Amino acid sequence: MANSTDTQIQEAPPPTTPGPGPLPATERDLRWRRFTHRNPRVRMFLIIAGVVALIAGILLWRYFASYESTDDAQIDGHLNAVSARVSGHVIKLLVDDNQYVDAGTPLVQIDPTDYQVALERARAAYAEAVASARAAQVNVPITAVGSSSQVSSAQADVQSAAAAVDAARRQADAAKAQLAQAEANNAKAQSDLERYRQLVQKQEISQQQYDQAVAVAKASAAAVDAARAQAGAAEQQVRQAEGKLAWAQAMLRSASTAPQQVAATKSKAQSAEAAVKRAKAELDQAQLNLQYTNVVAPVSGVVTGRTVEIGQNVLSGQELMRVINLDDLWVTANYKETQLKYMRVGQASDIHVDANGKTYKGHVQSIAGASGAIMSLLPPENATGNYVKVVQRIPVKITFDAGETREHVLRPGMSVVTKVWIR
């Protein structure tokens, strides 16, 4: 039926063609309908092409909406400054600019002679301090034992002297009693002698009895003198015993300072130990200073910015060169603030490097806390009358995935184009 219709249509006389000029819309529509009616495949192709174009448009829209891209990005890295930790004369230069070195590789040699001498001096001072500390430690127990013995001996001397004083006083009391007895006997003998003198004058007693009374009186007087002398000697012995007691007490007071002496000895020992620690610290510092004459690479990387030369005198803290760590690179991409709506930490990223045309894989590590303009030397001042709103850029740190930079072909400062897949 379709074929008969087509035949009928083909057999119809062609429409009259008007003169030159564009056809009316109705005429064009009529011709297009006749054309598509005669060629159904064209109509199907057009329908399919429209559907394909719609699907392609949707896919393209989804693709371009699935990432945020910027070419305001560059590779960044750590520029590790290598500085001298000691001052001195450079005698060896072991690397050159753009040379790759491993961590710990010697870079510069500073003359170690002065530091070797300082090390030997520190070793001698440390040995002397150790010897002094040992002697001080030996004196502590000796002083403790000697002080304890002095206290015990002084206490015994005080007790002995006190006993001697008591004995001397008792002897003095006995001598005083004997003196009193001798004086009483002498008084009686003198009274008897006076009576016998009167009786012998009256011849009432014999001369012999009187002579005996005279002898007894003389003996009694001599006994008084002897007793008085003994009493005086006993008093002298008391004074001597009291002097010995005072001396023993003084020695006891002196020995009682033994704890303070022991403490002083211990303090000297502690001071000697502190001196040992100080000398050990100085020895360690001297050893470190000698090690610091060998300047080594802090990290693995490429040497750049070398400013030191052989024969140069460098100071402590002076920068000699820099080592760029090629194993720890990242990308700083300055995205517009309008591109950060759906950007999150951890999203995947493609990093296209202009230098070699390669694309590397990475992910968003962090988003800066402020715009680049705020962190500039002269931040913008928006509180002015001629304020113009400008879309700001926020630095986004993108790190390479593991193993992406193992070839060591990337360098800080290279321009890149980044795509962050936000969907």
Image (cartoon, rainbow, N blue to C red):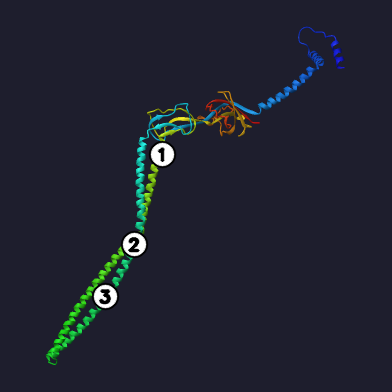
Residue under the image location 28 percent in, 71 percent down = 165
- Quarter occupied by residue 64: top right
Q: Position of residue 219 (x, y in %)?
A: 17, 82
Question: Is 39 situated above or below 95?
Answer: above
Q: CA distance from mark 1 to mark 2?
A: 49 Å
**Sequence-first disc among 3 and 1:** 3
Count up the numbered dots. 3
Q: Secondary structure at mark 3?
A: helix
The residue pinned by badge 2 equals 149
Outermost residue to the top = 19
Please state which of residues 366 and 101 is positioned toward the viewer in this rendering. 101
The residue pinned by badge 1 equals 288
* Amino acid, disc 3: Gln
Q: Position of residue 296 (x, y in %)?
A: 44, 33
> Which of labels 2 and 3 is toward the front?
2
The residue pinned by badge 3 equals 171
**Sequence-first disc among 2 and 3:** 2
* Amino acid, disc 1: Leu
Task: Please indicate, yes or no, whether residue 392 appears anywhere in the rendered image.
Answer: no
Residue under the image location 35 percent in, 35 percent down = 113
Q: Secondary structure at mark 2?
A: helix
